[in-house]
Image (tube, rainbow, N blue to C red):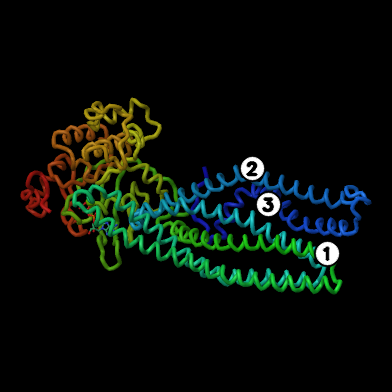
């Protein structure tokens, strides 16, 4: 497992280098094994030159050809054989090196993304994030593969060939040099545009993927409102956008290729005319002619290949940069540099002048101060949108306060490690999230080392056995994505069982029993009261009868705590709570 990463390198170059360094020996070998390919490309024209010059001097039927031609022939064959072995070794190394490279990147960005804030996940499409996490390792591999397997080889071939050609004739050496210089210059001129259009295209793809995933995950809403064709139409605008951006990116590549084609043609004309002129004036031998022609054609092939690969790289750089700019965003909520683990003795919670807002100038909480004693059972009540969920999210440090502090057993939660804070709080959220795994795994998630008997006991306490026993595969039943194959109340009960198993000193229930009938709710409440009797408990409920056994009620209104007391005190006070109590119809608060 990679160690936890607190910051990802933010530029693509440093990002790739970071992962190459972690496999430096592997990549060193890859560079070494590939070296014989450029050697063969640049040296074989030289052996062909010797071969042709000797052939010209031979008289067929009189001289012994095999003896006289042995040197260039053995040279050619050896060079070819070494190249063949080199490429095979590179191929075999690739089988092991690339998957490890991809895994390392994927694991690191996943681990880094896991520590992004709650708002980060609320602001980005899960589908878009998944697309980028899948694309980044693939694109980085492609870039590096091209750099080693193509650019490095082309540059080496070019350097050696240039030396060989300069030895034959300075004129051809210069022609070759200027051709490559112009070609590379032209490519560099275009690379910015190709890169830019590819990045925009990559963003359009990830937006489209995000929209498709969003539409598919709301399929029930689509069906219930009979909006299938509306959804297609809705997605169509993202499709059109993706197509337009894909075409723009492809046009940028095509335009660049046109000018490079033109340059190559002019260069060929110059080379051929000079070759004929040079031979006619006895500057060069027939062998030299073949060396120049062969080298030029070899190089042209390689350089064309490279230019194709440069456009591929420009595209992949665009894709990777788009992914990296989203995935390498610095963590919003960081552990304090000297963070220590939270030590909970009783579980007292204290908010001291806590101010918080989602958007500047729209304060939700202004300077609220509350003290909750260790082991106290507190009910949180208030109209929808009054800030109850946000209040508990702040205790979990899913958001940082804008000012003030929150202390648990006198330890500031912004100065303890987030993992230790979350380990000490069992939270049952408003909309419990289940993994598409078995019921057993979903419950055991609360404490991974819990025994099967403990999982079953937690399920029993959360009143899950009734429905689990009726499932064909019992605890081994897969629950569907986000628990879709279970009823709302069954999902809630599994979430409760998971929290019971966690057995943390602080328990938070956010509408955790809202989908249950009152008999089941009562049964679970009694069990919870017993098994978590020492836990500091915060219970958010719209159904006020749920709060009867609470030591204390906090009444929220527009982000302020307007009443604080026991149920009987608050009823006697005839304030906001008592109005809610009286108006409660069917056990729920009016909206
Ligand atoms: N992630 C967010 N970004 C911006 N505003 C938010 C966010 N989450 C909640 N809010 C706003 O903050 C206010 C309080 O929301 P909160 O979820 O805390 O209310 P609540 O009391 O739990 O309501 P309910 O009883 O409906 O669950 C609401 O106005 C809501 O729109
Ligand atoms: Mg809420």
Q: Residue at x 85, y 66 (%)?
A: 285
> In the displayed structure, does residue 578 sit left or right of residue 125?
left
107 or 554, nearer to the observer: 107
Q: Which mark is residue 495?
A: none
Counting the numbered discs, the total is 3
Q: Earlier in the sequence, mark 3 or mark 2?
A: 3
Can the viewer see residue 84 in this picture? yes
Name the spot of residue 63 as percent of width and height, x first: 93, 51
Q: Earlier in the sequence, mark 1 or mark 3?
A: 3
356 or 95, nearer to the observer: 95
181 or 509, nearer to the observer: 181
Q: Residue at x 31, y 50 (%)?
A: 395
Hey, which residue is sitting farthest right in the picture?
A: 62
Q: Label 1 to label 3, Cα distance in Å?
A: 36 Å
Q: Label 2 to label 1, Cα distance in Å?
A: 40 Å
Q: Which mark is residue 286?
A: 1
Which residue lies under the disc numbered 2?
Answer: 92
Q: Which mark is residue 31?
A: 3
Instruction: Tell me if label 1 and label 3 are in contact, CB under 8 Å.
Output: no
Circle 1 Cα neighbour tier, 10 Å, few/some/many (<14 / 14–19 / ≥20): some
Say what secondary structure mark 3 lies in: helix
Say what secondary structure mark 1 lies in: helix
Name the spot of residue 387 as percent of width and height, x first: 23, 55
Name the spot of residue 45 as percent of width and height, x first: 78, 58
Label 1 near ligand 1 (CB < 8 Å): no
Q: Residue at x 17, y 50 (%)?
A: 381
Q: Residue at x 58, y 62 (%)?
A: 310
Instruction: Tell me if label 3 and label 2 are in contact, CB under 8 Å.
Output: no
């Amino acid at each position: 497992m990679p160690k936890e990463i607190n910051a990802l390198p933010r530029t693509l170059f440093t990002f790739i280098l970071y992962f190459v360094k972690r496999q430096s020996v592997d990549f060193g070998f890859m560079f070494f094994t590939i070296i014989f390919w450029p050697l063969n490309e640049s040296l074989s024209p030289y052996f062909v030159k010797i071969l042709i010059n000797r052939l010209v001097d031979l008289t067929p039927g009189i001289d012994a050809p095999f003896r006289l031609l042995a040197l260039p022939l053995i040279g050619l064959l050896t060079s070819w054989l070494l190249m063949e072995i080199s490429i095979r070794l590179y191929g075999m190394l690739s089988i092991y090196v690339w998957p490890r490279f991809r895994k390392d990147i994927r694991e690191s960005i996943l681990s880094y993304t896991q520590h992004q804030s709650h708002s980060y996940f609320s602001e980005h499409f899960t589908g878009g994030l998944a697309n980028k996490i899948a694309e980044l390792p693939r694109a980085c591999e492609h870039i590096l593969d091209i750099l080693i397997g193509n650019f490095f080889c082309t540059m080496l071939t070019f350097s050696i060939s240039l030396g060989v050609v300069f030895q034959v004739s300075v004129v051809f050496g210069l022609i070759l040099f200027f051709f490559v210089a112009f070609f590379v210059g032209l490519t560099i001129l275009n690379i910015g545009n190709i890169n830019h259009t590819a990045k925009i295209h990559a963003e359009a793809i990830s937006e489209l993927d995000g929209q498709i995933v969003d539409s598919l995950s709301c399929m029930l809403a689509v069906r219930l409102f009979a909006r299938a064709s509306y959804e297609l139409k809705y997605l169509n605008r993202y499709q059109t956008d993706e197509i337009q951006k894909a075409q723009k990116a492809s046009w940028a590549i095509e335009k660049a290729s046109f000018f490079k084609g033109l340059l190559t043609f002019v260069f060929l004309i110059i080379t051929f005319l000079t070759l004929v002129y040079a031979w006619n004036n006895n500057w060069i031998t027939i062998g030299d002619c073949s060396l120049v022609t062969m080298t030029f054609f070899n190089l042209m092939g390689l350089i064309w290949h490279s230019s194709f690969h440069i456009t591929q790289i420009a595209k992949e750089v665009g894709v990777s940069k788009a992914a990296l700019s989203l995935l390498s965003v610095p963590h919003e909520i960081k552990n304090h540099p000297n963070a220590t683990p939270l030590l909970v003795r009783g579980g007292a919670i204290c908010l001291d002048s806590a101010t918080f807002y989602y958007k500047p100038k729209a304060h939700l909480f202004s300077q609220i101060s509350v003290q909750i004693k260790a082991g106290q059972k507190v009910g949180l009540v208030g109209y929808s949108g009054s800030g109850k969920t946000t209040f508990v999210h702040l205790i979990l440090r899913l958001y940082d306060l804008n000012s003030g502090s929150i202390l648990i057993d006198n330890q500031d939660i912004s100065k303890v490690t987030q993992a230790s804070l979350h380990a000490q709080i069992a939270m049952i959220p408003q909309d419990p999230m289940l993994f598409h795994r078995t019921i057993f795994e979903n419950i055991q998630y609360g404490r991974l080392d819990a025994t099967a008997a403990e999982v079953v006991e937690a399920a029993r306490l959360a009143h899950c056995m009734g429905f689990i026993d009726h499932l064909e595969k019992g605890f081994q039943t897969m629950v569907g994505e986000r628990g879709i194959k279970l009823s709302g109340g069954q999902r809630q009960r599994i979430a409760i069982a998971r929290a019971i198993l966690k057995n943390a000193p602080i328990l938070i229930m956010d509408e955790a029993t809202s989908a249950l009938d009152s008999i089941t709710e009562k049964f679970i409440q009694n069990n919870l009261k017993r098994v978590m009797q020492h836990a500091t408990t915060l219970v958010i409920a719209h159904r006020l009868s749920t709060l009867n056994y609470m030591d204390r009620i906090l009444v929220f209104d527009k982000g302020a705590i307007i009443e604080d007391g026991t149920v009987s005190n608050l009823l006697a006070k005839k304030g906001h709570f008592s109005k809610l109590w009286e108006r409660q119809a069917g056990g729920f608060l009016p909206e």
